[in-house]
Image (tube, rainbow, N blue to C red):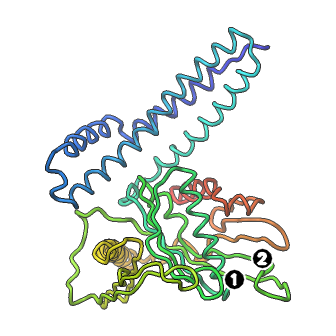
Amino acid sequence: MNELDISEDLASLRSTLGDIRAVVNVEKLESEIASLTEQAGQPDLWDDPEKAQQVTSALSHRQAELARVSNLTRRLDDVEVMAQLANEESDEAAAAEVRTELESIRKVLGDLEVQTLLSGEWDALPAVMTIRAGAGGVDAADFAEMVQRMYLRWAEQHGYPTRVLDTSYAEEAGIKSTTIEFDAPYAFGTLSVEAGTHRLVRMSPFNSAGKRQTSFAAVEVIPLMPETEEIDIPESEIRVDVFRSSGPGGQSVNTTDSAVRITHLPTGIVVSMQNEKSQIQNRAAAMRVLQSRLLVLQREKEAATKKELAGNITASWGDQMRSYVLAPYQMVKDLRTEYEVNNPTAVFDGDLDGFISAGIRHRASS
């Protein structure tokens, strides 16, 4: 076996990791974790459940962020030792394992490097995604459900905790809409590039003539604001409706009126929640999402006013941002970044990192 020399690879990867550590500010992270750990250890923490939730959630997020960087440091040290052993024993199988591990580390570092581009005001926050069926009838409802599964699979592959907060099922197949919470650091900054109109072209399984059908799904992504950034909503500005949670086909999955729908009368924004077991929990969750939506709306209005004053009100993104083509050929293409792949099955199974990375880099360079 020829001697395995990975010194240049290690030097390059360690340099990249050093840049990432500087941007992430590991020392500050460690200090915040120590402070939050001390707060979490207080015996009276859960006397105030809301504050306790804030502390434990913040601690979990920061620990996860630090772990990603620390694990890479450990893996780089380990792969260096593996390479030394492979050379000492002239073990080709071990050398192949070293090369595989280097490629894996390089990919993870690339993902983390993209994260350093997420420096927006809300980028570090968890996210709430709403997916709605658009034009296209039953095919659109089915497509919306495919998109829901796609993002849940993506989150599962990355170990990101998710909660389906609400789902409205269509009559024949698929869903009318769904709302998902992604409770992970930088979930908003990462997923915000996925917002927009998604288009599917395929031979319709719901058309007896087997004709090609085009359908659409809309994806909205908002940051889930911390409790401290909530805005007050007077009771007079909301209407609260309660109803029984339901599953596919309208079958009751709850025997009490625990689901909650809140309508914000001045804006017409509607938020529904049926994930929790009690009406009180669903109302609290719905109010938090409503407050996040209103804060985003408020900031968007402020930004639009500034752009108008500056004489530039052109939107930076088009409505249709990605096409998924299943017939007459196989392709998924992002219309903003020109990134494309020829394996729609893998994309619908959650292989979205290439699209997300390209979107973040494109946004940073715009």
Q: Residue at x 54, y 50 (%)?
A: 158
- Splitting the image into 4 quarters, where does residue 238 fall? bottom left
**Residue 202 — which label?**
2
Q: Secondary structure at mark 1?
A: helix
Q: Residues within 10 Å of mark 2 (few under 14, many from 20)?
A: some
Whether 44 is drawn above or below 86: the answer is below
- Between 288 and 267, the one lying in front of the other is 288
Q: Residues within 10 Å of mark 1 (few under 14, many from 20)?
A: many
From where the camera sits, is residue 306 visible?
no
Closer to the camera, 190 or 166?
Answer: 166
- SS at circle 2: strand
Q: Is residue 213 visible?
A: yes
Q: Nearer the viewer, mark 1 or mark 2?
A: 1
Q: Dividing the image into 4 quarters, which one contains the N terminus?
A: top right
Q: Which is nearer the eye, 212 or 355?
A: 212
Q: Residue at x 54, y 86 (%)?
A: 250
Q: Residue at x 42, y 63 (%)?
A: 127
Asked if disc 1 and disc 2 are in contact, CB closer than 8 Å, the reply is yes
Q: Position of residue 318 (x, y in %)?
A: 58, 75
Tell me the amino acid under the disc marked 1: Asp
Q: Which of the 4 image quadrants contains residue 66?
A: top left
The image quarter in which residue 278 lies: bottom left
Q: Position of residue 115 (x, y in %)?
A: 48, 49
Q: Is residue 294 above or below residue 58?
A: below
Asked if residue 157 is positioned above or below residue 344 in the image, the reply reads above
Image location of residue 40, percent across then percent down: 22, 45
Label 1 sits on residue? 139
Q: Is residue 166 left or right of residue 266?
A: right
In the image, 356: left or right of 35?
right
Q: CA distance from mark 1 to mark 2?
A: 9 Å
Which residue: 20% across, 42% down?
A: 41
